[in-house]
Image (cartoon, grey):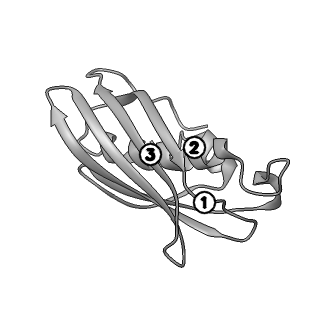
């Protein structure tokens, strides 16, 4: 999955820890991540959190996709901030999963809270590496 995850790689996201129902992804906020106010664009924060959830829900060896997600932007992230998104499974009932992801700075300040929903799709093949 990592080899084929071109979107996360292009955004500078690194997955540092993966286990069933858990994952951590990191990203250093660069100048290219900035919005018109000079802070990290919310789309990149969403991508970071979504990536952590994706690895957490796919760690069971059954392909899973997001079915929806919500994010609350708590504080701005600035250029140079090293962000960490920790995904934790809250529920897995049948093929449906529920995940919470907290995005923090290296100093521990919360930047965003994300809640995502997933669905396992048995037989969905991962794309070949690019």
Label 1 neighbour load within 10 Å: few <14, some 14-19, many 20+: few
Furthest-bottom residue in this view = 107
Q: Are marks 1 and 2 in contact (CB under 8 Å)?
A: no
Furthest-left residue in this view = 94
* Figure quadrant of the N terminus: top left
Picture layout, residue 12 above or below residue 42: below
Say which residue label 2 marks: 47
Q: Secondary structure at mark 2?
A: helix
Say which residue label 1 marks: 75
Disc with the residue nearer the chain's start (3 vs 1): 1
Residue 90 locus on image (x, y percent): 22, 45
Q: Report the side of 58 relative to 38 (left or right).
A: left
Picture layout, residue 79 above or below residue 50: below
Label 2 neighbour load within 10 Å: few <14, some 14-19, many 20+: some
Q: Secondary structure at mark 1?
A: loop
Mark closer to the observer (1, 2): 1
Q: Secondary structure at mark 3?
A: strand
Mark closer to the observer (3, 1): 1
Say which residue label 3 marks: 114
Quadrant in which residue 129 is drawn: top right
Picture layout, residue 2 above or below residue 121: below
Q: Report the side of 117 relative to 13 (left or right).
A: left
Residue 50 locus on image (x, y percent): 48, 42
């Amino acid at each position: 999955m990592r080899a084929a995850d071109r979107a996360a790689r292009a955004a500078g996201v690194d997955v540092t820890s993966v286990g069933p129902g858990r994952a951590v992804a990191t990203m250093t906020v660069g100048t290219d991540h900035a919005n018109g106010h000079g802070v990290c664009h919310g789309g990149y924060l969403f991508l970071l959190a979504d990536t952590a959830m994706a690895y957490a829900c796919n760690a069971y060896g059954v392909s899973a996709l997001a079915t929806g997600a919500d994010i609350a932007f708590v504080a701005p992230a600035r250029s140079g901030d090293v962000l960490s998104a920790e995904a934790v499974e809250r529920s897995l009932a049948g093929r449906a999963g529920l995940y919470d992801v907290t995005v923090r700075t290296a100093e521990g300040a919360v930047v965003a809270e994300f809640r995502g929903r997933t669905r396992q799709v048995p037989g969905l093949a991962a794309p070949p590496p690019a």
